[in-house]
Amino acid sequence: MDHVYLVCYDITDPKRWRRIYKTMKGYGVWLQLSVFQCRLNRQNLLRMTDTLTELMHADEDHVMIIDVGPAESITIRVESFGRPFRPIERRAIIV
């Protein structure tokens, strides 16, 4: 079962930030500078988590993964200003 996740990160080194940003583009939709919306099953969540922990430096960086809930049974309510917000839809993920 897929869940919707918000992944937010604060990476101190610009090179590491770019690597994590490029990695996250394979898992979800970019919302803001260091925020992605992802629709993942358990296996892809674990794969993403493993990759992020390998790329980051735990003593300098911070990554938060927020489980919003089951993708099929939630309605994401967002108040957005500026560019329109588009909830992530079910699709194949190529990693």
Image (cartoon, rainbow, N blue to C red):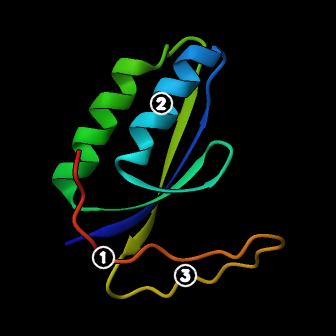
Task: Determine whether 74 is above or below 56 in the image.
Answer: below
How far, Cα to Cα, is label 1 from label 2?
23 Å
The percent coordinates of residue 7 (x first, y second) are 51, 49
Query: In the shown orientation, is residue 66 left or right of residue 39?
Result: right
- Disc 1 residue type (three-letter): Arg
Q: Name the residue under label 3.
A: 76
| Residue 3 picture quarter | bottom left
Q: Which of the two labelled residues, at mark 1 and mark 2, occupies the earlier sequence position?
A: 2
Q: Nearer the viewer, residue 88 or 56?
A: 88
Q: Which of the two labelled residues, at mark 3 and mark 2, occupies the earlier sequence position?
A: 2
At x 66%, y 17%, the residue is 12
- Disc 2 residue type (three-letter): Ile
At x 56%, y 15%, the residue is 15
* Circle nearer the viewer, 3 or 2: 2
| Residue 33 picture quarter | top right
Task: Determine whether 64 is above or below 38 in the image.
Answer: above
Direction right: furthest residue: 81
Q: Mark 2 points at which residue?
A: 20
Q: Mark 1 points at which residue?
A: 90
- Disc 3 residue type (three-letter): Ile
Secondary element under disc 2, as helix, strand or loop, is helix
Secondary element under disc 1, as helix, strand or loop, is loop
Secondary element under disc 3, as helix, strand or loop, is loop
How far, Cα to Cα, is label 1 from label 3?
14 Å
Q: Which of the two labelled residues, at mark 1 and mark 3, occupies the earlier sequence position?
A: 3
Asked if marks 3 and 2 touch (Cβ < 8 Å), the reply is no
At x 62%, y 24%, the residue is 11
